[in-house]
Image (cartoon, rainbow, N blue to C red):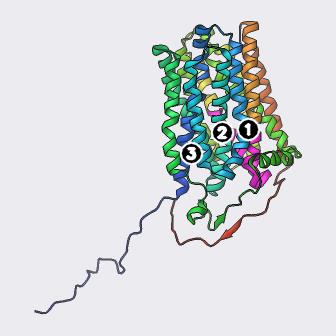
Amino acid sequence: MAFRPLVRPARWPQTLLVSRPVRLHPAWIVAAVAFVALVGAAGFRATPSVLLHPLHAEFRWPLATISAAVSVNLLLYGLTAPFAAALMDRFGIRRVVAAALTMVAAGSGLTVFMTASWQLIACWGVLVGLGTGSMALAFVATVTGRWFVHRRGLVTGVLTAGGAAGQLVFLPLLAMLVGAYGWRSAALVVAGAALLVVPLVWRLLREYPADLGLPPYGASEVVEPVRPAGGAAARALGALTQAARTRPFWLLAAGFAICGATTNGLVGTHFIPAAHDHGMPQTTAAGLLALVGLFDIVGTIASGWLTDRYDPRLLLGAYYALRGGSLLVLPGLFAATTEPSMLVFVIFYGLDWVATVPPTVALCREYFGLSGAVVFGWVFAAHQFGAAVAAIGAGLVRDELGTYTLAWHVAGALSVGAAVLSLMLLRRRGAVLMEPAPVAVAPKAWSYRD
């Protein structure tokens, strides 16, 4: 029996098309794991404003004393960042982040056994401050600097929003737990959440694209990482010494200090107590602060998108000026119920909350080259110094005057000043500190598509 050859109908394609699987670039996996880690660490970052009154009621500690623990937390959160960035360069992101999450869990869990205010400072201030500081925004700058060339600003915005997402996820839950079961249940939930993230980080968080023989996302060449020769502390301090000789560093640091004072230090710590002073239930105020976190996600991602397209100096000037105006009108918006005017403030302030981060990271990279992540760690330390001063300062104002009004007005004026500092950066553009270019090696024959 004769076999006839198979004749392909004319309607078939003339060439056989073999589908190629679309492979996701590992940069997106690393970014996703970093996001989850930031969310896990953000749980305890959301608790100070929820626990202020419960701790005051149980232990009879003054609000200024509890605020002092918050200030230590905020200060160490910032001071740890540049050293953590240098440690990530030397020992790897995975080890540093896993250790940091474990420290957060320990600090949060141990608070349930405290009986004196110094133990609050040791657990809440020192342990959690060091742990969360190791996963601060310098961690974001390190991940985006290593893994992304294209869409770097957008990814910076998304990762920065991880902290806001943590606040959004945890804050209403923590407020309900405190109301139903006491503040200790909230502390234990945060400890458990931080521990749950550790295996994910250890398994999936990669160090460099070159370790996989791949270029960063958006690049065409594999970039061999430039690994620092000295110790982490020496690298962090050396970067500070070089950056401190430049005018842009001080302008960025001063503006970011005001940013910290007007977000984490003041609104993040004292918004709920201030609303409670006007008769608003704590759970309602916590819900408003969580709404700030929701709109912060939108605002920060949008800011990252804008940073990829417009001058970050102009963006910073606009963000700070608008924030200042909103803080100046805030004292007149507090009431026992949620009025429409307060909702407008919450939405607006949420959009502006950490929208300053993507342009600040971009400017550190522009001015300081490969040291940009470490230098940003020092700029972020200034952010947390401002937050610490505002946290304890607002507590003292409340104890002495019985109201937060003066604190809101001072913060609004400072924000307008930060806008001026940001626009002063327009006088000098381009890199200030240059470092040797990384070595390019031949890429493997991998094909990734967006």
Of helix, strand and loop, which mostly describes the magenta segment? Answer: helix
| Label 1, residues with CA under 10 Å away: few <14, some 14-19, many ≥20 | many
| Label 2, residues with CA under 10 Å away: few <14, some 14-19, many ≥20 | many
Helix, strand, or loop for circle 3? helix
Residue matched to label 1: 380
Give amino acid for label 1.
Answer: Phe
Give amino acid for label 3.
Answer: Ala
Can residue 400 be seen in the rendering of this structure? yes
Residue 232: horizontal and vertical position, in percent? Answer: 74, 48
Mark nearer the N terminus (3 vs 1): 3
Can residue 311 be seen in the rendering of this structure? no
Q: CA distance from mark 1 to mark 2?
A: 8 Å
**Residues drawn in magenta:** 351-380
Res 263 quadrant in image: top right
Give amino acid for label 2.
Answer: Ala
Determine whether 385 is above or below 426 in the image. Answer: above
Residue matched to label 2: 136
Helix, strand, or loop for circle 2? loop
Determine whether 230 is above or below 213 in the image. Answer: above
Determine whether 26 is above or below 110 in the image. Answer: below
Name which residue lies at 79% across and 33% down.
418
Q: Among all residues in the image, which is located at the extreme left?
A: 1
Q: CA distance from mark 3 to mark 1?
A: 18 Å
Residue matched to label 3: 34
Q: CA distance from mark 3 to mark 2?
A: 11 Å
Asked whether the beta carbons under mark 1 and mark 2 sit within 8 Å of each other, the answer is: yes
